[in-house]
Amino acid sequence: MFEEIFIPNPNAEKPAPLRPRKGVIIGAAGQVGIACAYSLLIQECFDELILQDINTEKVEGEVMDLMHGMSFIAPTELHAGTVADAGKDADIVIITAGAAQKPGETRLNLVERNVSIFKNILGDVVKYCPNAILLIVSNPVDIMTYVTLKISGFPTSRVIGSGTVLDTARFRYLLARKLDIDSRSVHAYIVGEHGDSEVPIWSTANIAGRKLVPNGWENQPSANRDELNAIFEQVKNAAYEIIKRKGYTSYAIGLAVSDIIKAILRSQERVLTVSSFIDGLYDIRDICLSLPTVVNEKGVLKTVNLALSETEIKQLQNSAKVLREVFDQLKL
């Protein structure tokens, strides 16, 4: 009976098939994973998206729920599965799997538990998706990005962490609220670790080219420094405050991940503060942390060499030292 619904045009030619944009989210049944999936779907990022999770029943339920809303958005082939279902043409594998951060727990406390989880995950990722870009979202993200790089053997350009993309967004939001303008018009960065040693870059922060700290941090009146420090403290402690109230963060990181994915799939060559391998810049060697980085379809294209102040360089080097000390304790 269905054949009678449409009248075929005998002269119509089928378009040449395009290779679908294909992605996998590992850890998709968790709060962050499903927030990423939802954001990616409504922003039409992938043609095919596979959700993988150790909790197979829950991830199947999430897929069913999302599929029932497909008539409201552009079609995406969505299903529960594994990286083995993605095949060698997967574009991006997003890893959100890992132990949840508990109230009062730092991101770095999570390291041992999550390294063990990653060791189990990455074997299949390397086997079934050897050409994919790996986007790490699990915390502590800089350490997990470095762990992924070492275990997977992938090129440094194809292993990326979500880094301080969200911290930078929080920074711009709070500055914009203070200045009563759109946060997209604020150009300011948080760099270094996605965590307690992260660094606000005041020396280059600006609105339409007008610097927020025109005479340097050291020459600011103490009242100004106190006000600026208060904004940064809100940025640094934002996740802890949210976790204390609702138990986890999810929506904003889902949107941040979608921004990174769009920059990759659409080869936008966006500057984003993702976490990537740094070896030599600012005398920082052999570690993953966040700096303004140009991202395209190949992954990490290049890193912006910011003209940092002496104080900011020292703070960034300290952030790298914090991460290095943690990594040196791991047994891979």
Image (cartoon, helix red, strand yellow):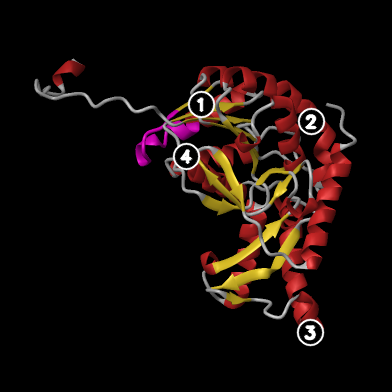
- Please report whichever mark, 1 or 4, sits nearer to the chain's N-terminal start: 1
> How far is the residue under mark 3 from the one under mark 2?
44 Å
Mark 3 highlights which residue?
Answer: 221
Q: Residue at x 76, y 71 (%)?
A: 230
Q: Nearer the viewer, residue 17 or 72?
A: 17
Q: Where does the image place residue 66, in percent across and percent down from the top left? A: 47, 34
Q: Which residues are magenta?
A: 65-77
Locate residue 216: give its quadrant.
bottom right
On the question of residue 39 being in view, the answer is no
Q: Mark 3 and 2 residues: CB-CB less than 8 Å, in contact?
A: no
Q: Nearer the viewer, residue 223 or 147?
A: 147
Q: Where does the image place residue 70, in percent across and percent down from the top left? A: 39, 35
Please name the amino acid that badge 2 sits on.
Answer: Val
- Please report whichever mark, 3 or 2, sits nearer to the chain's N-terminal start: 2
> How far is the residue under mark 4 from the one under mark 3?
45 Å
Mark 2 highlights which residue?
Answer: 115
> Is residue 154 shown in magenta?
no
Please name the amino acid that badge 3 sits on.
Answer: Pro
- Please report whichever mark, 2 or 4, sits nearer to the chain's N-terminal start: 2
Front position among marks 1 and 2 = 1
> How far is the residue under mark 1 from the one under mark 4?
12 Å
Circle 3 crowding by C-alpha within 10 Å: few under 14, some 14–19, many from 20: few
Mark 4 highlights which residue?
Answer: 265
Would residue 19 appear left or right of 149 to someone viewing this image?
left
> How far is the residue under mark 3 from the one under mark 1?
53 Å
Which quadrant, please, contains the C terminus? top right
Element type where label 2 sits in the image = helix
Element type where label 1 sits in the image = loop
Please name the amino acid that badge 1 sits on.
Answer: Ala
Would residue 307 appear left or right of 143 to someone viewing this image?
left
